[in-house]
Image (spheres, rainbow, N blue to C red):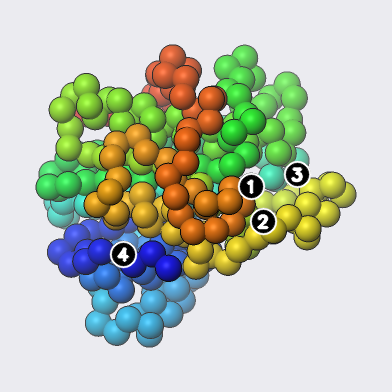
């Protein structure tokens, strides 16, 4: 098991930290001494996770703050709250997401739900928190993608899946968008001389409520999807969180790296090659500009 290095004196924000890989990452960061903000949509669930983390690691500094990535006003309020306090932010773990929603659904801002929750919300959050990240001595942004992104593409002609909606295709596109966001942020940081490290990860096949909450949100998964959930090799969140934790904390990490399970779906963490769709810098730059337009949020000058 990956041992998180000493994180004392560091502040970390983990999205989707009330369960699954987010909770596991938050718990291990807290256990290593970090002050951890559990950024969650449902504060009651966050408080329960906080209690469990503090029971496992007494005396740790854990707080719960509401964040709904499917609502840009919530993203703004969350970021404004942290900025008002002025404490440097060392780590941002973009972990939260929703997967394979059966019927097309929209966010509070009118975006397709998976694109909005998995990409546009985290994009706005990352850019709003960059001023705090840039005041930390060695800040990192670790963004969770997915193996499904390997076969995806960004459909700029139907980015919101308005004309044609497929649960799995929309999910894969949103996770490729996360990958491209991490890649472009690394390029932007290098070009502007920012100290922030932008790194990507994917959890392989990990048993969390991501595999049930999305597919049952407004319907039920298809037959093939249901069968795959049962037969595909999978691992627990303890192992599934490790690529993200490694990306966020390992001294071996460099900007633009990508980490995942050794055997694709399961296994210990290793550095893996970005798939071809994730290496297209032209698409990454175009997507970043489109996300700026859609969210009204840009990186600081």
Query: Which is nearer the eye, 301 or 12?
Result: 12
**Closer to the camera: disc 4 or disc 2?**
4
**Closer to the camera: disc 3 or disc 4?**
4
Label 4 packing within 10 angstroms: few (<14), some (14-19), many (20+):
some
Q: Earlier in the sequence, mark 4 or mark 1?
A: 4
Question: Could you say which quadrant of the image residue 291 lies in?
Answer: top left
Query: Which is nearer the eye, 243 or 289?
Result: 243
- Marking on residue 102: 3
Look at the numbered disc 2 and give the secondary structure of its residue. Answer: helix
Specify whether 44 is left or right of 292.
right
Which residue is tagged 1?
A: 99
Give residue 191's position: percent from left, percent from top: 22, 22
Q: Do the residues labelled 4 and 1 touch (CB within 8 Å)?
A: no
Q: How far apart are marks 3 and 1 (CA)?
A: 9 Å
Q: Earlier in the sequence, mark 3 or mark 4?
A: 4
Q: Are marks 3 and 1 in contact (CB under 8 Å)?
A: no
The vertical placement of 21 against 297, above or below, is below
Give residue 290's position: percent from left, percent from top: 45, 20
Give residue 156's position: percent from left, percent from top: 57, 17
The vertical placement of 194 against 289, above or below, is below
Does residue 106 show up? no
Specify whether 241 is left or right of 80.
right
Tell me what residue is drawn at x 87 percent, y 49 percent. 223
Tell me what residue is drawn at x 48 percent, y 33 percent. 274
């Amino acid at each position: 098991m990956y041992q998180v290095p000493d994180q004392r004196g560091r502040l970390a924000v983990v999205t989707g930290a009330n369960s699954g890989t987010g909770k596991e990452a938050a718990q291990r960061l807290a256990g290593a001494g970090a002050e951890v903000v559990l950024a969650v949509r449902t504060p009651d669930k966050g408080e329960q996770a906080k209690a469990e983390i503090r029971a496992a690691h007494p005396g740790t500094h854990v707080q719960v703050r509401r964040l709904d990535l499917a609502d840009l006003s919530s993203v703004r309020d969350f970021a404004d709250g942290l900025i008002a306090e002025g404490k440097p932010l060392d780590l941002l773990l973009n972990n939260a997401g929703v997967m394979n929603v059966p019927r097309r659904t929209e966010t509070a801002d009118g975006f397709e739900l998976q694109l909005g929750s998995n990409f546009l919300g985290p994009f706005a959050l990352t850019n709003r928190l960059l001023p705090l990240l840039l005041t930390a001595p060695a800040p990192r942004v670790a963004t969770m993608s997915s193996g499904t992104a390997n076969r995806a593409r960004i459909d700029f002609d139907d980015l919101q899946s308005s004309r044609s909606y497929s649960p799995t295709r929309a999910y894969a596109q949103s996770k490729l968008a996360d990958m491209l966001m991490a890649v472009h942020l690394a390029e932007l940081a290098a070009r502007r001389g920012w100290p922030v490290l932008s790194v990507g990860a994917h959890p392989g096949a990990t048993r969390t409520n991501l595999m049930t909450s999305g597919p049952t949100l407004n319907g039920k998964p298809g037959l093939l999807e249901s069968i795959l959930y049962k037969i595909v090799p999978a691992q627990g969140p303890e192992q599934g969180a490790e690529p993200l934790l490694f990306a966020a904390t390992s001294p071996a990490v460099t900007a633009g790296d990508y980490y995942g399970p050794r055997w694709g779906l399961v296994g210990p963490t290793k550095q893996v090659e970005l798939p071809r769709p994730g290496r297209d810098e032209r698409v990454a730059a175009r997507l970043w500009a489109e996300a700026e337009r859609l969210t009204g949020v840009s990186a600081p000058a």
